[in-house]
Amino acid sequence: MLKIYNTMTREKEVFNPLEEGIVKIYTCGQTVYDDVHIGNAKTYSSWDVIIRYLRYKGYKVLHVQNFTDVGHLTDDADQGEDKIEKRARERKINPWELVDNQIEEYWHVIDDLNINRPNISPRATSLIPEMIDIIKILLEKGYAYEVESNVYYDVSKFKDYTKLSKLKLDEESAKARVDQDPLKKSPFDFALWLNAKKGDQMHIMRWNSPWGEGYPGWHLECSVMSMKYLGETIDIHCGGIDHIPTHHPNEIAQAEAATGKKFVRTWMHAEFITLNGKKMSKSLGNYVTARELIDQHGGLVVRMGLVPGHYRSAVDWNPDVIANAKKNVERIQNSLSLIKDSPGGTKTNLNQAIEEVQKSFEEAMDDDFNTPKAFATIHDFIKQINSSLDNKKDILNKAREVLVELLGVLGLDFTKKKGIDDAKIDGLMELIISLRDKSRKEKNYELSDEIREKLRSTGIQIEDTEDGPRWKMS
Ligand code: AMP
Ligand code: ZN
């Protein structure tokens, strides 16, 4: 029986999807103006583990995760600048180019970390007509108001606006903010549509609407993308804990006011990665990118650094995290090699350990995806394997299969040889080719031919082209 902690009720609840056997899940995605930092990656990796486990349990999972490519402002009070337009201006490029580049880079990171891609990854800008339709409904129903070509959501109209955040809306202290939007009736109201013209600046990413040229608000985007691809009520909606006070309450207010139905059945929120105790964040500038860590240590080690922590526990990023991850990867690789190299014996006691590890792994994961416990059971299993190499070879092979499968549920792919990913292979090939080049320049043809032949015997061909040597698998 799977139990999930629902932020809405602040309790662990037995999970049953609305439609038998199918789980519809929406995860709030990246605002694509900067690189994925290791905090973002931890959150995406947590959702990936959860989805993998649901699939392991036999559910069909439909997962949607958006790209926010417009409308996320630098200031939560709708007074700031669009993060994407600001960064594009700083880099002196078109915002659309920035978005394209960031999304491409995002996928490289996600793939290197072995995070499964969602079934659907919509860009917010692909659903502008649908967003305009929802705003029209909210205006008709009296939940929204227009001022100077901006449209705002009137929070006072939505009963139970704070049901997720459990916060008391303190109007006085909110009003004390210097950078308040003077067009709003209340500081808690939020923008559904923003006028493209602000002062003498024109927003580059803009669309026609009944309220003039403009662009949608960030909160509206998620409600619309979730409803478009998953339906008006979904099973699970995920995000970081930073979304509990505002972003998710706003999503609920928009969706439920528009449809009159419950928007989300289970809310899940991931804790932060911190750096020296402070939230790692792009806007604060205190972050480590996932890319630099992957290039330095490989995707498997970085992913290993993210997996053993629980999604509701904060992690302070420090050198020990990677050092421990390396040790864990080596321990597992060592055990897999021991199994491979063992001729096997006559014992059969490992059979029981195989049954037990599956049971305790599932027990741990059924308890709100308790990955630290699940990981500990895998460790115990490895110890048992290492001291049971005299078991029959088919039992050892079965143990290997189960070990690899359970690690796979945690997003750790040990089927790749020694965890070497494509980026590392490219790097190694560059090194080998440059050594061959050097030996040729030094007229050491014996060595350069030997390198070429050795590579050929492993199925790699070097071709000398006008642009220099290239390699390919033959
Ligand atoms: P953003 O950085 O706003 O594009 O956020 C993308 C996702 O990463 C959201 O679900 C955030 O809640 C999450 N996130 C942002 N910063 C952190 C952090 N330091 N640790 C964990 N998750 C984070
Ligand atoms: Zn969202």
Image (spheres, rainbow, N blue to C red):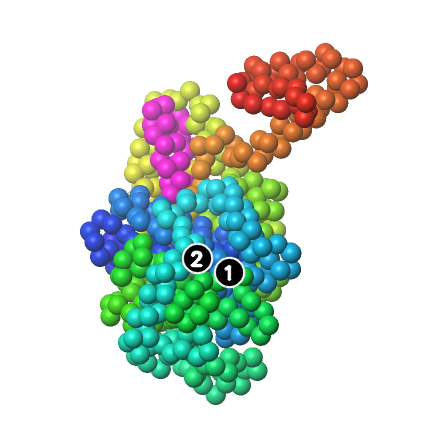
Please tell me which residue is depicted at 45% across the width and 74% down the height of the picture: 150
Please tell me which residue is depicted at 60% across the width and 58% down the height of the picture: 88
Badge 1 is on which residue? 205
Name, please, the residue furthest toward the left. 20
SS assignment at label 1: loop
Whether 387 is among the magenta residues is: yes
Q: Residues within 10 Å of mark 1 (few under 14, many from 20)?
A: some
* The residue stretch that appears in magenta: 385-410
Residue 146 placement (x, y as % from top left) = 40, 78
Q: Pick the residue in front: 64 or 93.
A: 93
Residue 462 placement (x, y as % from top left) = 62, 19
Q: Main secondary structure of the magenta part?
A: helix
Badge 2 is on which residue? 125
Q: Is mark 1 within 8 Å of ligand 1?
A: no
Q: Is residue 374 visible?
A: no
User: Which numbered dot is residue 276?
Assistant: none
Q: Amino acid at mark 2?
A: Thr
Dots 1, 2 in contact, CB < 8 A: yes
Q: Is residue 385 left or right of residue 351?
A: right
Number of numbered tags placed on the structure image = 2
Whether 453 is among the magenta residues is: no
Please tell me which residue is depicted at 56% across the width and 61% down the height of the picture: 85
| First of labels 1, 2 by sequence position | 2
Residue 218: quarter of image:
bottom left
SS assignment at label 2: helix
Residue 186 placement (x, y as % from top left) = 43, 83
Q: Amino acid at mark 1?
A: Met
Q: Is residue 35 left or right of residue 246?
A: right
Q: Is residue 449 visible?
A: yes
Q: Pick the residue in front: 165 or 353.
A: 165
